[in-house]
Amino acid sequence: EYWLACNEERAAQARFGAVMCCCGPCAMYRRSALALLLDQYEAQFFRGKPSDFGEDRHLTILMLKAGFRTEYVSDAIAATVVPDSLGPYLRQQLRWARSTFRDTFLALRLLPELDGYLTLDVVGQNVGPLLLALSSLAALAQLLIAGSVPWWTGLTLAAMTMVRCSVAALRARELRFLGFAL
């Protein structure tokens, strides 16, 4: 998950000078830039309520809105604590999804100023998982109602997953990335 997010997603975004989320344990900011945005960063609200998740994505969007570039450094080394079981991993993924969704609203006004690829990427980060969930639910509903699922539904989901994981396995030169398809 981390390798794909950094070495695929953020590396691609950096080609346009706008990494859309500088990860907490991997991010560095100029003190002068942070000082300009500190009040906005500390007063993080969503739908009128204080928000205490996704602070790294929120700060990144504030930096971009202020006109700063955000970059990706491929040879940087960082350490972080990651979930070691399914429950904490799923809670982390839900927090990240909520952050992506929430901060997409902040980014919408910013996107016209950035490259079209970044607009496509931000939209894809929100619409892609939604379409995957809807496809899975539709397949499950059809299975329950009709007792079968169209073969192309499973084939499409498997093909999309295998293509992404195969590209990562080739780029990382690690076959274990194929297991991420599961």
Image: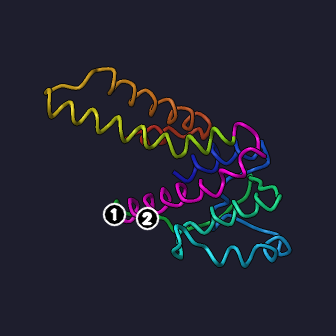
Percent position (x, y) of residue 129? 45, 43
In the rendered structure, does residue 165 fall within the stretch colored magenta? no
Q: Main secondary structure of the magenta part?
A: helix
User: Which amino acid is tagged 2?
Assistant: Pro
Figure quadrant of residue 137: top left
- SS class of the residue under badge 2? loop
Q: Which residue sits at x=56%, y=66%?
A: 54
In the displayed structure, 104 sits above or below 49; it is above
Residue under numbered circle 1: 87
- Which disc number belongs to residue 48? none
Percent position (x, y) of residue 132? 40, 38
In the displayed structure, 37 sits above or below 9; it is below
In the displayed structure, 45 sits above or below 70; it is below
User: Which amino acid is tagged 1?
Assistant: Gly
Percent position (x, y) of residue 43? 64, 77
Residue under numbered circle 2: 83
* Contact, mark 2 vs mark 1 (Cβ under 8 Å): yes
Q: Which residue sits at x=56%, y=38%?
A: 168
